[in-house]
Amino acid sequence: MSDKRDVLYGSLGLMVLKTLEALGPLHGYRIARRIEQISGDQLALNQGTLYPALLKLELAGWIDSAWAESESGRRVKVYSLTKAGRRQLRSEEHAWHQATGIVARFFKIREDLP
Amino acid sequence: VRLIRRVLSFVRSRDRDLREEIESHLAEAAEEYARRGLSPIDSMAAARRDFGGVLQARDAHRDLRRGSFVNELDKCMRDMRHALRDIRRHWRFYLLTSCVLGIGVGATATMLALMHFVLLRPPAGVVDPSRLVVVPTPDGQFTDYAALRSRLHSLDLAAYRRRAVSIGTGRTAYEGVIECVTSDYFGVLGSTAASGRLLGGADAGTRAGSAAVISPSLQSRRFAGAVDVLGQPLAMGGKTFTVVGVAQPAFTGLRLDAPDAWISLEGSPDVCTSHGSLVGGSASVTTIGRIRSAFTRQQAAAEASTFSPSSGSSTRVGPGHAYIELESVEQARVASVRGLVRVLWWLTAGAVCLLLIVCSNVAGLVHLRLLERRRDFAVQLQLGATRLRLCRELAAEQLQVVAAAAFIGLLTAWWLTRMATTYLPFSVPVALDLRAFLAITGLAAVAAIVSSIVPVCNTARLGIGAVLRQNQTTSTARSIAANALLVVQATVAFALIGVGVLMLRSVSLMWSQTGYDINNIVAISVDLQRSGYRPDAEVMRFFQDLRSRVERVPGVERTGLSSSGILGGPPDQVFIGLRSGPGGAQGYAGMAAPEAQAVSPDYFSTVGTRLLSGRSFGALDNDTSRAVTIVDAELAKQYWPRGDAVGNCAYLGHQPGCVEVVGITESRRYKWLRVTSPEVFVPLAQAGRYRFSYLHPRVVLARTSGDPERLIGRITEAVYSSDAETPAIQIGSLSTFAGDQARSTRLAAQLLGVFGFSGALMAAVGLYAILAFAARRRGREMAVRVALGAPRAAVVVALCKSTMLLVAAGCVAGTVIVFIAAHLLKWLTFGIAPLDPPTVVVSAAILLGAALAGGTVPSYRILHASPALLLKHD
């Protein structure tokens, strides 16, 4: 049995946005590989699910796409972060930290709490 | 924006794109596995395993796309339905807004269509009109054209002239316009025929037979639209032509109005010129040229200057020499209707003013409506609705209003275009420019949507607490802005009404101060000179017979004979020198020679021209009696300033003998409705003494007891009752001829009248919005006043007073604008002082009346509502 973990529900979009912010415009395969590499190959990302997620982000206006040529000379669709996407990333990042902070507090519960 | 993005995504991101994207994904992944040492088959298998289900990915992608699009569409429909419900509830308000917007859009679109038609439309059926120029020649004669043609290398030359001739014979004959063209005319223009052929070199010889190309309008008029008209005979100007072709429907030559037919100038000089020859002073032509491809306009101008050292406005003095400037045919075409262009500029300015009033009014109305809904917006925003959501709802509402306005605008534009086409002297109907219409509608939509979104943004900015607490008060700055807007609206509306009234008065004055009765006269001009089959001796007998036949028509009161028509008729006139003594000067400097007319004794009583002193001609003023004459008041005053014209001697033309002045008539506007022209009358019985070819009877004038238009048919029957081939060139009432002359003024009057009326309507609507707004704003104050016992009428007066004062201020400012406009429009407003009291009074009455009507609804509400209700409403 693999020790890889599934992508947490709703977090794939955030990962894509953060990857595009950090690494600039990338095509679908590169995004998938980067997400896997950044997770230290701990995530079991079903790469096919990436494309509906990319479409969702594009429809929301957070990323933009254009056809270009990859390093190997293939015609690929390259995705890039828009201004609205950058704003959205900031707000989601803040919300994520807040949520994980709250959950982390629960793990620190000690019996001697008032 | 999101909807558009989603629609584009739905349309663009097709399955094919996704398939290609997935394929390149798998290829990239396989390549990476191959680099790690896997075989090609294993690499691809590993890549597919990592990717997961390709079909599932495609399905999920497609569902997302479709779902997003359908979802947006559904939201849109929901917004539309919601807006429609609100529109149904307040249909009166929305109908008013749509009508206001529609009238403005329609008026502006019409004016843009007219401007496009006259100024911007290139000549139809002409190849590359930008290389066609008008070539000025020294005397503008055919001989100049012929001389230039063989010399110029940079231009292909052609020439044409227009002429009014009788078309057809017998009772179906009418006066039409033909264009006499040189053999290379159609070649230079690059035109083609709709059927048959156009004129060419073979038609230039006088022995070549007489070929004619007809316009489609003549085809339908003369041949009842028959398709097979080629080879048919057609009488024009007393000569029979053979139809060899039909021009393209939109082809109008190089003018804005199309002639009835084109014939060869070289082949038919007898029809094209008054003296039947192309040599001499009667063959003036317009010479045009197409610049050959190897030359520029400057080179062509320089070459033309070498051979044609012209003078006048087309000449420019260059460094060291004078050179002529070649005007393009498009410029010449517009220049030929300069008066109309000026009218159109004024009308466009009026339409733009109207659109501005409309947009400000719509903004005011929408603002007023949304103020009532501000609390709803605040609550909705508080409950979680986004600002975008509310704006979408309002935009959907405004879009439906604009759609209705566009429909009303189309109807308005259709009606106005039809009206304008009636008054324009062009045979081609004016078509509405759909792009301009859509652009104006788009502008109106933007104005409506922006004015609806602003209150939502304000509400969101203020927050629910502020909005709910707010006591409907507005800032002083906003009140000042609203008041200023009202004054500007009232000013522009007054100016539109004022100029419209000025024009209408001008038309009515034109009709009433002509010096003859314009309403009850029918003129019958008979072209005996051109028919050439009656010797001069028979002319008088023919006319006496014709006159007695016309007199017998029931409804004709009396008739008179004349050698000239009024406001039309035979084109050739007789100008005669006049001296007040044997050695006296022939008139004063700058004064035109008077036109001589030979008239029968009962002419003056027939046309209703008053004799100011002396007597009319009588039966005793015949060929054997002493020569007598009647002059008009203008001539009498200038030649005999002491007022002793009657009984004095006048010397006419080269006649050595003295002619006794026996009477003075009032000055008449007999040639042009706008200006008086000097006239000298001699008795028909003595006309032979002056030996002028056109001083014999040519026109029968009949005074009718009722509407002359109804008698035209019977009079036409009477004219042809003895000779079916009588070449009558014109039978019509003077009011019809006057209507033709006053087309530009009437177009301006009618359209400015419509704009003025619409402006008044807009002002009423604007005032309604402002008063209704004030009534809402001051509702609590009104309620308290009424509750404390103040008479309701006094409360209404207090509410309306300041607003009516603003409208009055607009009237004063508008009067100044009308005064300035009247000065600038002096050439159009005949005989009316710029500060015309009736115009000011009528305009002020219309505007104040409209303003009062606009204020009625809010005042009525205050008068009939209980104070408790007003407080509660507030």
Image: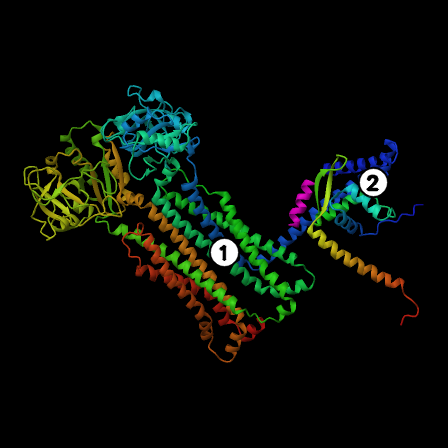
Q: Is residue B393 magenta?
A: no
Is B785 displayed left or right of B455 in the figure?
Answer: left
Q: Would you say residue B452 is visible in this rendering? A: yes
For marks 1 and 2, give the CA distance: 58 Å
Q: Residue farthest to the front?
A: B320
Residues flagged by tags 1 and 2 on a common chain: yes
Please determine whether, in this image, residue A98 is positioned above or below residue B685: below
Q: Residues within 10 Å of mark 2 (few under 14, many from 20)?
A: many
Picture quadrant of residue B200: top left
Name the residue type under label 2: Phe
Q: Is residue B11 magenta?
A: yes
Which one is closest to the eye, mark 1 or mark 2?
Answer: 2
The main secondary structure of the magenta stretch is helix
Is B418 displayed left or right of B138 in the figure?
Answer: right
Q: Nearer the viewer, residue B684 or B315?
A: B315
What residue does disc 1 label? B359
Percent position (x, y) of residue B856?
46, 66
Q: Chain of mark 2?
A: B
Percent position (x, y) of residue B498?
36, 57
Q: Element type at marker 2?
A: helix
Percent position (x, y) of residue B787?
52, 78
- Disc count in the image? 2
What residue does disc 2 label? B51
Q: Which residues are magenta?
A: B1-14
Name the residue type under label 1: Cys
